[in-house]
Image (spheres, grey):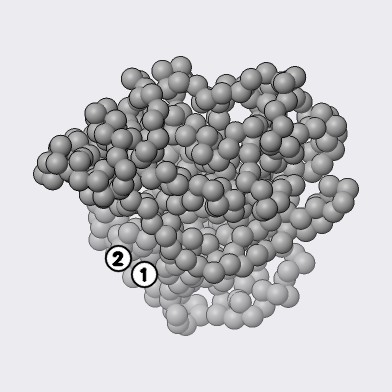
């Protein structure tokens, strides 16, 4: 949770001498979008890809990448967008510091859930943006636009995002906190700042004390940063100490024109890349359906034999269905052949001192809870054949991060959303590359799962599948740490 350090809610926030609306407009400029507020005359920038038409007190954030395909393919003259802010996080976490600047604890603050929404307009037409600036009311502005383009050329859509009120200090702080979290390169649009350390941004002419602990993403405003020895952990914002007093000794700071901004991060121009990601997702799901359906049919006789052997060794149940989380955090039953004795969960706590895995996982090289037939199934991954049913249902994929339960994901909140942005897989990088070295298993799990999410593609998926097949047929693999099952 992004926090604001050393600030008071009584005054409106500024960072580097820039107000919340200037930072807001700079963010959109970095993505090729010029913000136009009704009743405010500004020069229209010829290099703008889009114009975002707003009310005078509106500040918004949404992922325009989610709209890139729609904007490109529907080719509407005007997109009337409803931005919905759900405020659906029941609590926030904040680092609390003592008077010396040392971390004392991480506090959790609960808040009421609420929802707000703004109507904004996106258009590529300069004359519509100019007309919006000249109108006295929102009703009049919309009437002019709809009459000019015709209702048939208006696309109505909605998306999730952030809605903030200009002039409301808490709302402005909430916007700036959001920008810190989603804008890794503010220097693209803001001339006069530099990256003092990885992800830590300060004004030109200012530096950080070598003794200061500063971990990005972090925006350090106009303040005496040269002598700071605080502990500042991002994502966070250090607001200006004296926003009303310009410092003439520091270089000037301004928003760049859109034509002068490096287009490397422009979101509006990412439609081709998004289309490739969409094609990859469709092809991957098609492959999952085909392979899982054929695999279940081919493996049916083998699965029947495994079921009989488990029943003879330790009775029923034959399957173990542990609760796991798939994309978005949705829970599902991950089915496997049972490889442990039925009382495995009951005796697990007596083996805690022999756990060879770090983090929330449990692993023993010679786990006494495992059935004799279970050792054979685990050696060749045959216990995971029922997961083909999970793949067929859409809960899992053939390749992806390790399927994990909610209690394990809670141990790594900073990485949880990354892992849960894709479906878990029967196999993945962690299963192939883990070393089982003491004290590293949990770190390797996080490392390789995140690496997969960042590099996912056809080539990597094919390599993982072929490597898994080679390892299983060649020498078998060591089984992943798990609960009883």
Q: Secondary structure at mark 2?
A: helix
Q: Secondary structure at mark 1?
A: helix
User: Residue beneath label 1, please?
Assistant: 305
From where the camera sits, is residue 21 visible?
A: yes
Can you name the residue that lies furthest to the right here?
100
Asked if 236 appears above or below 341 in the picture, the reply is: above
Dot label at residue 301: 2
Q: Nearer the viewer, residue 400 or 309?
A: 400
Quarter residue 23 falls in: top right
Residue 145 position in % (x across, y down): 21, 40
Q: Above or below — where is 458 with respect to 160?
A: above
Residue at left 79%, top 43%? 231
Q: Report whether residue 414 is seen.
A: no
Q: Residues within 10 Å of mark 2 (few under 14, many from 20)?
A: few
Decide: is 330 above or below 61.
below
Residue in the image at 54% along x and 48% along y: 167
Disc number placed over residue 405 in the picture, else none? none
Looking at the rendered structure, the number of numbered marks drawn on it comes to: 2
Is 344 on the left or on the right of 282, as rendered? right
Are the residues tagged 2 and 1 within 8 Å (C-beta)? yes
What is the x, y in percent for residue 460?
42, 36
Please indicate whether residue 186 sits to the left or right of residue 99 in the image. left
**Image x and y of residue 179, in percent:** 54, 41
Residue at the (24%, 46%) spot, across then down = 140
As measured in the structure, the alpha-carbon distance from the residue carrying label 2 to the one carrying label 1 is: 6 Å
In-front residue for pair 154/167: 167
Residue shown at 37% from the left, 53% from the top: 118
445 or 60, nearer to the observer:
60
């Amino acid at each position: 949770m992004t926090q604001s350090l050393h600030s008071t809610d009584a005054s409106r926030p500024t960072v580097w001498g820039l107000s919340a609306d200037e930072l807001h407009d700079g963010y959109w400029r970095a993505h090729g979008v010029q913000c136009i507020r009704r009743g405010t005359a500004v020069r229209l920038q010829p290099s703008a890809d889009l114009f975002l038409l707003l009310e005078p007190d509106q500040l918004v954030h949404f992922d325009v990448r989610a709209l890139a395909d729609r904007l490109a393919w529907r080719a509407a003259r005007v997109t009337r967008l409803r931005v919905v802010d759900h405020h659906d996080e029941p609590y926030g976490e904040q680092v609390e510091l003592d008077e010396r600047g040392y971390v004392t604890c991480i506090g959790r603050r609960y808040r009421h859930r609420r929802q707000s929404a703004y109507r904004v307009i996106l258009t590529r037409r300069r004359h519509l943006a100019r007309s919006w600036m000249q109108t006295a009311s929102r009703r009049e502005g919309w009437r002019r636009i709809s009459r000019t383009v015709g209702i048939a050329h208006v696309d109505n859509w909605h998306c999730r995002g952030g809605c903030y009120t200009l002039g409301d200090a808490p709302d402005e702080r909430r916007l700036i906190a959001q920008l810190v979290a989603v804008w890794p390169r503010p220097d693209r649009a803001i001339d006069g700042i530099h990256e003092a350390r990885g992800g830590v941004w300060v004004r030109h002419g200012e530096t950080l004390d070598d003794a200061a602990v500063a971990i990005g993403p972090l925006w350090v405003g106009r303040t005496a940063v040269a002598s700071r020895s605080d502990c500042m952990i991002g994502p966070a914002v250090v607001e200006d100490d004296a926003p009303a007093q310009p410092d003439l000794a520091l270089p000037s700071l301004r928003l760049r024109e859109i034509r002068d901004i490096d287009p490397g991060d422009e979101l509006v121009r990412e439609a081709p890349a998004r289309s490739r990601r969409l094609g990859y997702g469709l092809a991957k799901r098609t492959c999952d359906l085909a392979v899982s359906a054929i695999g279940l049919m081919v493996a049916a006789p083998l699965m029947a034999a495994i079921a009989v052997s488990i029943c003879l060794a330790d009775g029923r149940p034959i399957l173990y269905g542990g609760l796991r989380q798939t994309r978005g955090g949705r829970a599902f039953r991950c089915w496997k052949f049972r490889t442990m004795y039925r009382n495995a969960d009951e005796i697990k706590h007596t083996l805690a001192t022999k756990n060879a895995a770090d983090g929330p996982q449990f692993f023993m090289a010679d786990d006494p809870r495992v059935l004799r037939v279970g050792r054979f199934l685990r050696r060749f991954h045959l216990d995971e054949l029922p997961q083909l049913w999970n793949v067929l249902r859409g809960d899992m994929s053939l390749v992806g991060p390790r399927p994990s339960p909610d209690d394990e994901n809670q141990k790594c909140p900073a990485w949880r959303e990354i892992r849960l942005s894709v479906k878990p897989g029967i196999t993945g990088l962690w299963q192939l590359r883990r070393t089982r070295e003491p004290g590293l298993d949990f770190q390797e799990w996080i490392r390789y799962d995140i690496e997969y999410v960042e590099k996912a593609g056809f080539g990597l998926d094919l390599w993982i599948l072929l490597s898994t097949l080679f390892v299983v047929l060649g020498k078998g693999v060591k089984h992943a740490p798990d609960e009883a099952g």
